[in-house]
Image: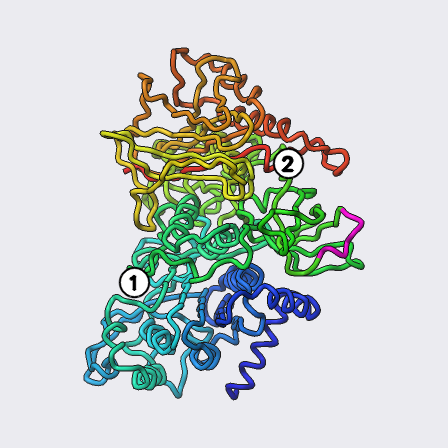
Amino acid sequence: MKRRAFLQRAGVALAAMGISEAGLLRFTRYSQALAQTSSRKLALLVGINQYPQSPALAGCLTDVELQRELLLYRFGFQPQDVLVLTDGQATRQNIETAFVEHLVKQAKPGDGVIFHFSGYGSQLAVTPTDTTQLPITNDPLPKIQNCLIGFDGLLSTKDNAGVNVLAEETLWLLLRSLECDRITTILDTSFTDPSTKGLIPPLVGNLRMRSRPTLPGNQLGAKELAFQAELASQIKTNTIQKLLGTDKPGQLLAASDSERIATELQWNGFSAGLFTYALTQHLWQVTEATTVQIGMSRVTSTVAQIAGHQQQPSLTCPRSEQQTQTYHLSPELNTGAEGAVIGLEDSGKTALLWLAGLPATILEISGINSVLNVVSPADADTEKTLPTLQIRSREGLKAKARILSTDIDQIQSGQLVQESIRVLPRNIGLTVALDASLERIERVDATSAFANVPQVSSVIAGEQPADCLFARVDPVSSISIPQYGLFNLGKELIPNTTGEPGEAIKTAVYRLTPKLRTQLAAKLFRLSGNEASSRLAVKATLERVAQGEQILMHKVTRRAGRKNPSKRVLSSVNSDTSILKIAVGSQIQYRLENESESPVYVMLVGIDSGGSAIALYPQTTDSKDLVILPGESIVIPQISSPFKSIVSAPSGLAETHLIFSLAPFRSAIAALDTLNPPRGDQRRVASLFNPLEVARAIFQDLHEASAVTTDVLGISSDSWALDVNAWATLSFVYEVV
């Protein structure tokens, strides 16, 4: 196919993936009106689910759609400047051709360029010869080469000797061919050989891996080597050394480091790369200039909560770019959003929504009848809102909403939407995935056993969404004695869930029932998260107490209007993008600040590194004990308290949720009081033995604090209706080492 015809066909595919032609036209006019700069923004997005002669992936096309909608609606890209290649379009040659024609030949100094790849990666074990040399420098090729596998990368060819893949070195050459400096590369793939990690491809736990075993063959394809030579000959010689060194062009945002896997996850109605979803969701929510380093740190925390240590996102960029914005771009509007209006139907009475700005865990649970505000672009800085929308149905990341206004002409494609009322069912349950390595009789017995646990269901790993994993602790073999435990979705053992060898499955499930209730409570705690959407002006800082107060991490409600903001200077000791690590034996405390004009009440709950629930017990049963007056702050535990918060073993992830509310936590305090905790003169953080009851009580308190007129909105009494401005949950995730 000729290059021009190929690109024209790809452009047709771009328009077919998303909004209608009319919507595209409306949005084009809208984004043009928003444009604040003359520089151009170009993107090439590649996603491959279907591979001949290889297990199919499920989330790569969603990744492309996630990036495309983000670039259009959040960063003001023009539709014609975003080129999409999917499945059969994304051959090695087509990817390279599109990169040259769409990016290299069009990008000028000052422009911004984004390249995204979602699909399989692998490694090629090269047998060096006299002819396999890097262009120009004649240095030997690396013995192990990382490769991106295009649609045809696993097919044998007669006219192209060698392996038909896009080598990582080729990608660096292409990037160095660009005349602009604002370059971002996103790779949601991995290169490590899963067969060397004792994993069973293509699944690990309930996550699907995006890496294939080391490719057979001893050299790159002849066409790939020739293309490398052609690119290198056109690059200025003074950039070659940078190319061959560690200084990669621009920002490289990778789903995982070189030693770990990249994964994709199935949610309710869609699958997506774990990294891509976390990244794009974060970028939908940003309200101001956020550095790529801070952004990637937040993404890493989100990934760690699901995959544990199996996946570790990485950022590679020159030191001078670590404090630049993610993608080198600012949002077109200085306000975060949960999504955008992508079209209208039913004579303008129904709005079509894209909702990738919501955390996936909240999106899949949040019920019908949730309410969103439409943000006026002209009044974004003043936070003036247009009529509200109420969700009536959802399929994957798209939803239909009725417009709660008679003046429907105010709604237009391209406008952003923000969460207003979160509706959650009261009967939220826990889903356990049964590991694929279990034998058939084991899965049958486990299914029967879990069916007898209230609010717990089971599915086969890889087939449906799940919250945790039931699996053997020991490797499966003909001579192994079964030993069962509970794992996260990345198949990392949850502490203190291992049974005795030879334990019957039904006995194991009965033994794990309290842990299952704790896991369900943890799920509810996370569902309260609204750091990005709440306008309740509060702040929380995690500090280490050691010869003074050392700030480790801070969180703040991003949309809150602060008339008297705190003057406290905050800085973090965690300067890289990895998850925060705190050593065993460290003394920590939380500093909570109320920057609003109303008193706020506080609850602290969480899960420690040992997998147990914890909570802050008040000094007395009086619900007013944990209250912060306007402009004031408190420290938990109090500096003078004899009950120090000392980080204890074992090593592992821990999470703390600080929940602020405009109303007292009467039900939650009552639930805590049923435990008859020891009373003292000071507040203390201690183990929580009824976490599920406390979690449900917290949601009931937030429901009552919200005072939503459920009858007017048609919200069932079987649901909690939560006004996101009536509370704020700030969450801290860190690793105990």
Of pointers 2 and 1, the one earlier in the residue sequence: 1
- Decide: is 74 above or below 563: below
Residue 125, horizontal then vertical, whole percent: 27, 71
Q: Which residue shows up at 35% across the image and 81% down it? A: 224
Is the residue under label 1 in contact with that under label 2 (CB below 8 Å)? no
Q: Nearer the viewer, residue 682 or 673?
A: 682
Q: How is the image coloured?
A: rainbow
Asked if the stretch drawn in magenta spans residue 14, the answer is no
Residue extent of the magenta highlight: 405-411
Identify which residue, 721 or 412, lies in the foreground.
Answer: 412
Numbered badge on residue 318: 1
Q: What percent of the width, then of the height, locates residue 684?
A: 39, 20
Look at the image and tell me in which quarter the C terminus lies: top left
State whether residue 609 is above or below residue 252. above
Amino acid under disc 1: Pro
User: Residue at 37% across / 77% down in the picture?
Assistant: 174
Left/right placement of residue 219 relative to residue 303 reads left
Q: Which mark is residue 425?
A: 2
**What residue is at 58 percent from the left and 80 percent from the top?**
9
Disc 1 secondary structure class: loop
**In the rendered image, which quarter is residue 453 located in?**
top right
